[in-house]
Amino acid sequence: MRLILRWIITALALFVAAWVVPGIRVDGGGWVAYAAMAAVLGLLNAVVRPILKLLSCPLIILTLGLFVLVINTVVLWLAAYLVNTYLGVNFRIEDFGSAFLGSLIVSVVSVVLSAVIGDKD
């Protein structure tokens, strides 16, 4: 049940990001696009993100943790590329700036929704 709740929260956060950021577009597919993107993003956050954080540990320490924002951006951009290329879902991120702003919005909305719903991470 907790996994499904996290998946729904991530899908809603992606919806908000696509709604707010002009460089993030979802063409057709409706909620299927957000659900697929949330599933792939969750998988990448579980597998790829820890590896990237381990490899960039000196940069994270040097920037006092701000490099984690770049890692989040890369993971979001990679997830959009994967769902667009391999799953045929039209979730597109145009540039790094849009991916950066989108990753910030997804993070903030996820934290707020988790706090409101009461999902403990």
Image (spheres, rainbow, N blue to C red):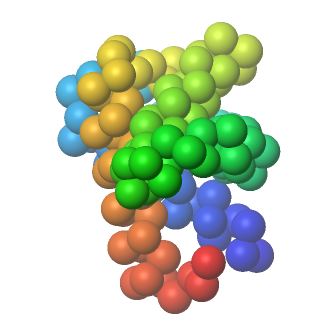
| Camera sees residue 59 | yes
Q: In the depicted view, which residue is nearer to us: 98 or 30?
A: 98
Quadrant of the image for the C terminus?
Answer: bottom right
Q: Residue at x 44, y 64 (%)?
A: 110
In the orientation shown, which residue stands out farthest toward the bottom?
A: 118
Which of the 4 image quarters holds residue 86?
top right
Q: Position of residue 43 (x, y in %)?
A: 74, 45
Q: In the depicted view, which residue is nearer to us: 61 or 27?
A: 61
* Vertical order, 7 against 117 (above or below): above
Direction from residue 26 to residue 119 in the image, left or right: right
Direction from residue 119 to residue 112 in the image, left or right: left
Q: Residue at x 21, y 27 (%)?
A: 22
Direction from residue 74 to residue 46 in the image, left or right: right
* Vertical order, 24 against 31 (above or below): above
In the orientation shown, which residue stands out farthest toward the top?
A: 85
Q: Position of residue 106 (x, y in %)?
A: 40, 51
Direction from residue 55 to residue 106 in the image, left or right: left
Q: Residue at x 60, y 30 (%)?
A: 79
Q: Position of residue 113 (x, y in %)?
A: 42, 73
Q: Position of residue 20 (x, y in %)?
A: 22, 41
Q: Residue at x 64, y 24 (%)?
A: 83
| Camera sees residue 34 | no
Q: How many marks?
A: 0
Q: In the depicted view, which residue is nearer to us: 28 or 15?
A: 15
Q: In the depicted view, which residue is nearer to us: 71 or 36?
A: 71
Quadrant of the image for the N terminus?
Answer: bottom right
* Vertical order, 62 against 87 (above or below): below
